[in-house]
Image: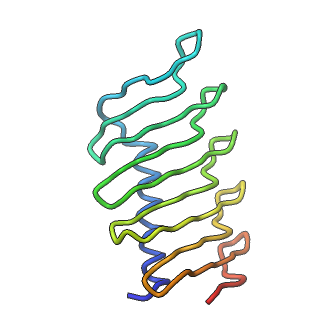
Amino acid sequence: MTIEQRLEKLERELAELQEKVATDFTTRALTVAEDERGESYALMMAHRLGPSLVLFGPNGKERASLSATKDGLGLVLFDKRNNGRVALGLGEDEWPALSLYDEKGARRARLYVGADGPVLGLYDAKGNPVWSAP
């Protein structure tokens, strides 16, 4: 499997994880921190995919999510409109990847480090490669 194929697989896994984390909380949640009104700022969750820690901003919107699954680890940072903007993952192969998204959700940059070394890619608003190295 090439580095590009491995990176694509890791990004698919991370996207699936983001979607499942957002829609598949069917289990227990423990409030770790709350404000004076009793609104949660941090939740620890256990669900069928694995444990998660979710942080919320003062407006009650999700700002960060850290999840561990059988396929790896994922950290997603959200903007004030609750759009995922930064995704950091460590896949089951133990290689790290970082993806940066624009305000519309399009991946604009990604960095992956694999057995053959680092790969950096930059993309236009439609997801087409603009530049990559090596």
On the rendered structure, is 44 left or right of 82?
left
Q: Residue at x 62, y 78 (%)?
A: 120
Q: Residue at x 39, y 66 (%)?
A: 91
The quarter of the image holding the N terminus is bottom left
Q: Could you tell me residue 123's position as x and y percent?
A: 69, 75
**Residue most toward the top?**
37
Residue displayed at 62% across by 45% down: 78
Please state the horizontal and vertical placement of residue 117, each as a whole percent of the image. Answer: 51, 84
Name the residue nearer the viewer: 16 or 95. Answer: 95
**Closer-to-camera residue (94/104):** 94
State how the image is colored: rainbow
Residue at horizontal 47 percent and vertical 75 percent from the top: 8
Taking 51 as reference, is 18 above or below it? below
Task: Using the image, determine if residue 106 lies above or below residue 33.
Answer: below
Residue 69 percent location from the top left of the image? 32, 53
Drawn side of residue 20 relative to residue 131, left or right: left
Q: Quadrant of the C terminus?
A: bottom right
Report x, y in % for residue 103.
Answer: 72, 54
As rendered, which of 13 and 94 lies closer to the eye? 94
State how many labels appear: 0
Q: Vertical placement of 5 versus 9: above or below?
A: below
Residue nearest the observer in this picture, 70 or 48: 70
